[in-house]
Amino acid sequence: MSVQGSRPWEKNKSRGNRLKKENRSNGRGVQKASTLDPGLFIKKAVHTQEETYTPSRRIIDLPVDKRLIANLTRKGYSLPTEIQDKTLEAILGGKDLLGIAQTGTGKTGAFLVPLVNRLLGSRPGFQILVVVPTRELAVQVEQEFRSITKDLGLYSACFIGGTSVNKDIQTLRRPCHIVIGTPGRLMDLASQKALNFRQFTGLVLDEFDRLLDMGFSRDIQRIIQAMVNRRQTVLFSATEEKSQRSLIREILNQPVEVRVSAGNVAADRIDQEIVRVREGENKLEVLLAMVSEDGFQKVLVFADTKRWVKKVCQKLQQAGIKADEIHSNKSQNYRLKALNDFRNGKTRVLIATDVAARGLDITEVTHVINYQQPKNFDSYIHRIGRTGRAGKAGKAYTFID
């Protein structure tokens, strides 16, 4: 193995598939070993000529209300993305839709724009339900809804864990056009008779594969069964799991299917490598050596548990690294502030559980580091998908104990 420059941690980098799958705790408590072949975490970025999608029309040419177009152009949008361009008519026409597109390709706008256009002029009456896997994504979707519906007389509500249930119940006394929420909180409100799924005619499952993978499958099925007046269902995700196809067929009725990406491969622009932690080495010190380098400007570190997220964060902070953490034990306000500080550069390293791997709008992440091996390849793809976005190069490292 080569040693490059003065980087002591680089002696641990490995590009081969010869690693054994070990179940050593390395003095840090026994953890269940990943069953993934470490070779899956090794791939050189492919620097090919990027194929730029040329949309068939401009934003100002979209067949939607001129007031909506004005709001979109005011936000700086001039051209629709590929997923937006190819799904617009289907959603406008009330058809069921399955959309597969990589993170950062505008999936939120793809379903919001046509749905907002259909809602214009209607009285608020809980028409559309948008279900997402994480609190942060729910907040993002509502923020986008509010920005594109400015002065259009449309109303939304967002219901997520970590907030007051009583306040949510009060909010539901005022009808709105669109409700955005996480499955757990939506089911809580329904069980208290504050939210009636029968009222909704449209359903959007954003990051649907993650919704099903995170244990929300039963809640999703209950919501769907209760939506007896459902006339349109839209599913969007970055990946497509074969094991979920039967359920997707049950949910959708003669859907239009749009695949902008294959749905099962990592971004070609991401350099993927592994860092082997040898017996007796301090894994936290290896991580500290990496993120202390100048090139690691905006780093997202994934750890499997809340305990490890906290421990890694404390270690980096003690060493003078501007680091913060997000996981389910943190309040919603704390998590949103941590994300905003990371976005605007106040924090250089953000340590998170998989809650940050899906749907979050975090741009220009230079490095993703998996402190522990992901339990499955789908999780790995979404983790590293935080870097190498919008045509930029990215780096992903996975620690192998």
Image (cartoon, rainbow, N blue to C red):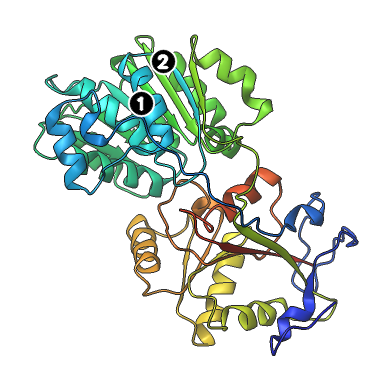
Nearer to the camera, 120 or 277 = 120
Which mark, by number, is residue 373? none
Determine the image quadrant of residue 161: top left
Q: Which mark is residue 226?
A: 2
Mark 2: which amino acid?
Ala
Q: Amino acid at mark 1?
A: Ala
Of mark 2 and mark 1, the one earlier in the sequence is 1
Q: Residue at x 81, y 49 (%)?
A: 35
Residue 352 visible in the picture: yes
Q: Does residue 95 sit above or below 302 in this rendering?
A: above
Task: Give the quadrant of the C terminus.
Answer: bottom right
Query: Hey, which quadrant is residue 155 in on the image?
Result: top left
Is 86 left, or right, of 278 in this rendering?
left
In the image: residue 155, left or right of residue 331: left
Taking the spot 48% from the left edge, 10% from the top edge, the residue there is: 253
Q: Quadrant of the N terminus?
A: bottom right
Q: Residues within 10 Å of mark 1 (few under 14, many from 20)?
A: some
Q: What residue is at 57 percent from the left and 15 percent from the top?
A: 249
Circles 2 and 1: CB atoms closer than 8 Å: yes
Say which element carries label 1. helix
